[in-house]
Amino acid sequence: MHIAPVEKTQFTDNQSFLDQYKKHNRPVIFNNVCDDWPAKKKWTVDYLCNVVGDKQVPLYGGQEAKGHKHQHAHVAQMTFREFITELNNGNSKLRMFFYNILAQAPELMKDFYFPKIGLKMFTKLPALFFGGRGAKVQMHFDIDWADLLMFHFGGKKRVYLFAPDQEKYLYRVPYSYSSIFEIDIDKPDFERFPALQHATGYMAELAHGDTLYIPPGFWHYIVYDDMCFSMTLRALPRKPRHIFNFLYNVIYIRTADGLMRKFVGQSWNDKNRERAFTIGNRFAERA
């Protein structure tokens, strides 16, 4: 496996971003995009507890969805303040995933603005992601094939990124947007997953105030080195191929998997895991 560091630089102007990064599907970290946001100074764990501490938040865990359970179903629900207490007590499994700020915490909208970066941002879905020290997020890609801007707050986090053409080495589970659950890109097991040795990707090290650009369709695996959080803004796909991928994922893949999990259950999951191993190992042999 070859992992290169993501370039970290300053944002200068829209055209440079479009020509150097967007056009070539290159991830990049900008360290100055949110410098003038109130959020850069205000958004701490204590501040969020004051604003949304008593609100219920759905939480996601560190276990694979089994049986009839939907692969993206949350595993627990508690107040945000209770969630933070769990993290402070060392819980590295529970994560807050895709918390819709506009719908759930509109008070936070005054603390940031949608950046003029050359992308037409979708303003209806600013989302927060929160995890404790040691938390890891399963390798996956976003089904909408959006351009993503990840604004990071608090401690350090690492994001491993792989372009869509590397999917053949990542053991994607059919009818999902994820790799086999046990894959740990931070500590890859090449004996069990030999195709991973041939994957080429990037690693972004994020600190407070950094903004990571993730191109459409990129796979990502996330490691929380500290308790921290990020907000993701997105620009929906505009290229015909990307729009097709978006619609195919949402209308067909998600629907088919949901129905099969509901009516068939674990045998459907097991069959797809076996296929993921077979396909991945086949590409390992060919590489």
Image: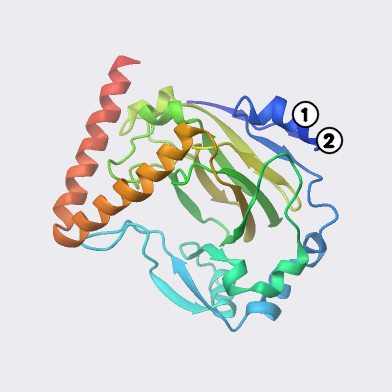
Q: Measure the alpha-carbon separation of dots 2 and 1.
A: 7 Å
Give the residue type at disc 1.
Ser
Image position of 241 with respect to 138: above or below? above
Of helix, strand and loop, which one carries label 2?
A: loop
User: Residue drawn 57% across and 76% down?
Assistant: 80
**Relative image position of residue 119 (x, y in whole percent):** 67, 41
Disc 2, disc 1: CB below 8 Å? yes
**Relative image position of residue 221 (x, y in whole percent):** 50, 44
Let me know if residue 162 appears in the view.
yes
User: Residue drawn 34% across and 38% down?
Assistant: 172
User: Residue drawn 26% across and 23% down?
Assistant: 282
Q: State the image quarter where residue 184 is shown.
A: top left
Of helix, strand and loop, which one carries label 1?
A: helix
Give the residue type at disc 2.
Thr
Q: Check the picture and name the quadrant holding the C terminus.
A: top left
In the shown orientation, is residue 204 left or right of residue 194? right
Q: Nearer the viewer, residue 73 or 135?
A: 73
In the shown orientation, is residue 35 left or right of residue 120? right
Q: State the image quarter where residue 279 is shown.
A: top left
User: Residue drawn 79% across and 52% down?
Assistant: 34
Image position of 96 with respect to 158: above or below? below
Query: What residue is disc 1 on?
Result: 16
The label number, if any, that marks residue 154 in the structure image: none
**Relative image position of residue 234 (x, y in whole percent):** 60, 49
Q: Residue furthest bottom?
A: 54
Q: State the image quarter where residue 106 is shown.
A: bottom right
Query: What residue is disc 2 on?
Result: 12
Q: Residues within 10 Å of mark 1 (few under 14, many from 20)?
A: some
Let me know if residue 155 appears in the view.
no
**Relative image position of residue 125 (x, y in whole percent):** 58, 59
In the shown orientation, is residue 138 left or right of residue 275? right
Q: How is the image coloured?
A: rainbow
